[in-house]
Image (cartoon, coloured by chain):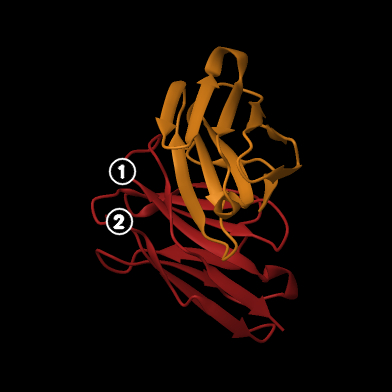
Amino acid sequence: EPEVTQTPSHQVTQMGQEVILRCVPISNHLYFYWYRQILGQKVEFLVSFYNNEISEKSEIFDDQFSVERPDGSNFTLKIRSTKLEDSAMYFCASSKVRDGTQYFGPGTRLLVL
Amino acid sequence: GIQVEQSPPDLILQEGANSTLRCNFSDSVNNLQWFHQNPWGQLINLFYIPSGTKQNGRLSATTVATERYSLLYISSSQTTDSGVYFCAGQETSGSRLTFGEGTQLTVNP
């Protein structure tokens, strides 16, 4: 069964450094998403992406965040200058249609020191 | 955006017991999903159920969209059912899923 994959599974970085989190959505899906979950809290939406542009973003997704689909398979989340409060699990998800099932990847656990 | 509330926040069961988890949402949704977050943090899709009833093995779910709630039933619970159960709704005009706070389920042997 096709699944969403994410790399790396864990990343440790120093405050102020740039990180890029990578995702390979399910191949015939057209809608892509990033969510995050701070330890012990609920999952929060960051951004959705369709047709090579952001379709919706939350108030969390400020200028330090960006997303890109650099080729036909990858979908990336860049955090330009990490802060301590960016430490969280980041999930990528994809869906075939806008209101269809969103399938989540296994997550990247980011720790900012 | 929609509001999603889950109850109870915590639930402790003995193996073999049945349980019902509830999810209330504030507005009409065109996507309601239930997830199980396992001890490794992975979000496992359980159901996509904007309305009606679905069953998958020991799990079943019912969403009554007109009354803005969804229920997840777990029968004959097993220790491997332990973890956090989240429901998440998507409003008709947007793409984001809004998650509830989750129900922490512990099944004891």
Residue found at x 70% / y 63% = A39
User: What chain letter is assigned to the residue under label 2?
Assistant: A
Q: Position of residue B60 (x, y in %)?
A: 48, 31
Please identify the residue farthest to the bottom as the structure is shown: A14
Residue matched to label 1: A96
- Whether A8 is drawn above or below B55: the answer is below
Q: Which chain is orange?
A: B
Report whether residue B5 is seen: yes
Please identify the residue farthest to the top as the structure is shown: B66
Residue found at x 69% / y 45% = B14
| Viewer-side residue, A97 vs B54 | B54
| Viewer-side residue, A85 vs B89 | B89
User: What chain letter is assigned to the residue under label 1?
Assistant: A
Q: Which circle's residue, 1 or 2, is located before the other in the chain?
A: 2
Q: What amino acid type is highlighted by mark number 1? A: Lys
Report whether residue B29 is seen: no
Element at badge 2? loop
Residue found at x 27% / y 65% = A73
Tell me the CA gap for discs 1 and 2. Answer: 9 Å
Q: Quadrant of residue B28?
A: top right
Q: Is residue B26 left or right of residue A57?
A: right
Q: Quadrant of residue B26?
A: top right
Q: Position of residue A97 (x, y in %)?
A: 33, 39
Element at badge 1? loop
- Whether B52 is drawn above or below A6: the answer is above
Q: The red chain is which one?
A: A
Q: Do the residues labelled 1 and 2 touch (CB within 8 Å)?
A: yes
Residue matched to label 2: A26
